Amino acid sequence: MPGSLEPLDLEVHIPYHFRCPISLELMRDPVTVCTGQTYDRPSIESWVTAGNTTCPVTRATLTDFTLIPNHTLRRLIQDWCVANRAFGVERIPTPKQPADPALVRSLLNQTSSESAPTHLRLSSLRRLRQLARDSDKNRSLISSHNVRQILLPIIFSGADELKHESLALLVLFPLAESDCAALASDSDKVSYLSRLLSHSSLEVRVNSAALIEIVVAGTHSPELRAQVSDVDEIYDGVVDLLRSPISYPRALKIGIKALFALCLVKQTRHKAVAAGAPAVLVDRLADFEKCDAERALATVELLCRIPTGCAAFASHALTVPMLVKIILKISDRATEYAAGALLSLCSESERCQREAVTAGVLTQLLLLVQSDCTERAKRKAQMLLKLLRDSWPQDCIGNSDDFACSQVVVVPF
């Protein structure tokens, strides 16, 4: 059912034959199985993937698992959606059909053929990227044909256009740990990716950062992760992505994912500070979506654990007010990271303590310790309350005797 359709609030009745027999929701991509019954594609695919071999309605054995699109019913559903637009029903989009395995094999063969003209290889790569973007099923199909082994050699050799198109396709797939380790241990390939971070094309820069993030996050060896993150140009390029215009949200998403992965390597966090990460994180925090805001706050907390990072954040006039403002607004994880960052800042600076109290942190922290957030967040809040006790306004002290700050136990984190 479209997200905007609220059955309890709208006086609209969905025709019975427009509902999927499995999910009982409005079908968006109706397909017919060999028994003649029609289901929504995601529902029947999940049914079959779970190991079921019978038709959910008739209980007859499915002798053929081919799913035939029911175009007539889909058009009727679309017409019904349009007719009920006044009730807030959105027209379902025309679904894109799954990729043909034979087409995928042909495109991959064309891509890997060094004797094929460059323009044909580029065309195949672009078609594969379009198919991969269409659905998870298409990505799974393409991945099953050893796409990584085909693309990796092209990325680091050959014409620039082929390299860039291959990179754009590769980052749509996860890499095996062995592939990540092989890339991380090859300094020439890491240097090449770092140079791409200063490319004139924003898309190339974003895709390079995406592959760097995949490699760093997918490498189990701390030594190899440190080897990648020790390259100065990588931090400069990744931080620069976070300065991209909000009109290109993918740059912000990939940028913060890559920066967070790099900052997990403790011994190179100072490079993020030197690249200007603290100021950029504070300035762009409001532009991140929820999941990315969590990563941004986690990165802030990580950088606050080193002296140069703590000093850089403390020197930004908006850091403490911003952390106080959002400490309870995003998610439990974000609350924990914001509390941890504030604890680090206030532990090192009396000025930050005064700024936090002025911004209203006491009320926020008292609400936090009584909330359902994580125990780590509560411990950090209690430690921060104890730290700030001397900075509390006099009228607050008299009303807070029931809060047992004296019972706070400092726990290392």
Image (tube, grey):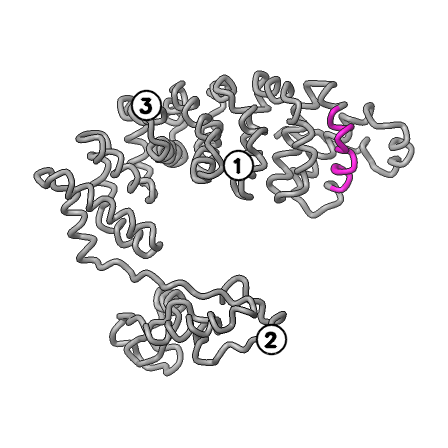
Q: Where is residue 363 in the image (x, y as percent from the top left)?
A: 78, 37
Taking depth in this image into account, of 410 and 28 the one nearest to the observer is 28
Crowding at mark 3 (Cα within 10 Å: few <14, some 14-19, many 20+): some
Residue 190 location, quadrant: top left
Q: Nearer the viewer, mark 2 or mark 3?
A: 2
Q: Position of residue 239 (x, y in %)?
A: 46, 26
Q: Where is residue 57 in the image (x, y as percent from the top left)?
A: 40, 80
Marks 2 and 1 close (CB-CB < 8 Å): no
Taking depth in this image into account, of 91 and 20 the one nearest to the observer is 91
Residue type at tag 3: Arg
Mark 2 vs 1, N-terminal side: 2
262 vs 103: above or below: above
Residue 60 location, quadrant: bottom left
User: Pointer 3: what residue?
Assistant: 195
Mark 2 vs 3, N-terminal side: 2
Asked which secondary structure carries label 3, the reply is: helix
Cα separation between marks 2 and 1: 42 Å
Q: Give the range drawn in magenta.
A: 355-367
User: Pointer 2: what residue?
Assistant: 11
Residue under the image location 25 percent in, 48 percent down: 128
Asked which secondary structure carries label 2, the reply is: loop
Question: Does any portion of residue 88 appear in the rendered image?
Answer: yes
In the figure, is residue 128 to the left or right of 386?
left
Q: Nearer the viewer, mark 1 or mark 3?
A: 3
User: Pointer 1: what residue?
Assistant: 295
Crowding at mark 1 (Cα within 10 Å: few <14, some 14-19, many 20+): many
Cα separation between marks 2 and 3: 58 Å
